[in-house]
Image: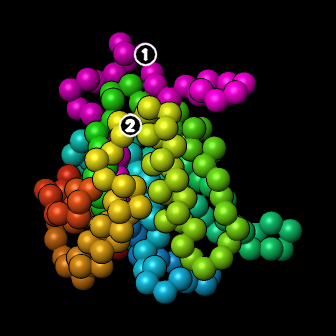
Amino acid sequence: MHGTEAPTEITQPSAMVNRKNKSRLYLIFHHQPQTGPMEEGIKFHTTVNVAPKKPAPPIDQSWRFHLTHAMRRGVPTLQYQGEQVVNSEATMVAAVLVCKLDPGITGIGLSMLLREVPIFPLGDGSEAGQWAKDALRLLVERDVIPPLRVNIDDIWEHGHRFAESVQRKAGRTIHTCDIYGTEIKSEIPRTSS
């Protein structure tokens, strides 16, 4: 804990947790909405997602944490959004399985904690990816997830390249890779658009 910050509860009591099926923490690459300037080479909107093991597509069991476009006093800006969502969205292109979460970690707790991740001014379109990387760094720093074996910038880069390579591939699941960019069996079913 830093300074005089109040503790952030990100876990629930162990008696209320299903210890057998740990949730998964993903970086998800979505088709990029064309709402602002784009950095050369940034083709996808990046979100941090928590999903249960083998999620069913039409159910709101997952959590999505990311930046969204907003207007403040007539000026385009970015804002943080953490919300419970359906387990699979038509905009999903690819996923990186970052790690499994301890059973007591809750979406609402992560939603509160990730409010602390800085939001940089709207610029070239790379802000969502930078925010997602900074979110992972905060989760490591606060011991929510273990230190990762690969640099977080490299994990994002591997995921982005993987998303580029699979963006036109069909399948019953969202193509998923590990933190090294190697395709692994996906648990996220694809939904129709």
Q: Give x and y (percent) for residue 67.
A: 58, 61
Residue 12 falls inside the magenta stretch? yes
Q: Give x and y (percent) for residue 66.
A: 53, 57
User: Residue at horizontal 31%, vertical 66%?
Assistant: 159
Residue that mark 1 sits on: 13
State which quadrant residue 146 falls in: top left
Q: Is residue 71 left or right of residue 169?
A: right
Residue 69 falls inside the magenta stretch? no
Residue nearer the viewer, 12 or 38: 38
Q: Give x and y (percent) for residue 156.
A: 38, 63
| Residue type at the position of mark 2 | Ile
Distance from disc 1 to disc 2, alpha carbons, whole Å, reads: 18 Å
Q: Does dot 1 land on a helix, a strand or a loop?
A: loop
State which quadrant residue 178 falls in: bottom left
For discs 1 and 2, the disc positioned in front in the rendered view: 2
Residue that mark 2 sits on: 145
- The outermost residue toward the top is 15
Residue nearer the viewer, 47 or 63: 47
Name the N-terminal-most of marks 1 and 2: 1
Q: Give x and y (percent) for residue 85.
A: 45, 51
Scheme by which the image is coloured: rainbow
Which range is magenta?
1-27
134 above or below 75?
above
| Residue type at the position of mark 1 | Pro
Q: Does dot 2 land on a helix, a strand or a loop?
A: loop
Label 2 near label 1: C-beta < 8 Å?
Answer: no
Residue neighbourhood size for the residue with mark 1, other residues' Cα within 10 Å, grouped as few (<14), some (14–19), many (≥20)? few
Task: Using the rendered image of the protein, determine whether residue 55 is visible from the camera's viewpoint.
Answer: yes
49 above or below 161?
above
Q: Is residue 95 left or right of residue 33?
A: left
Q: Is residue 53 left or right of residue 133?
A: left
State which quadrant residue 168 falls in: bottom left
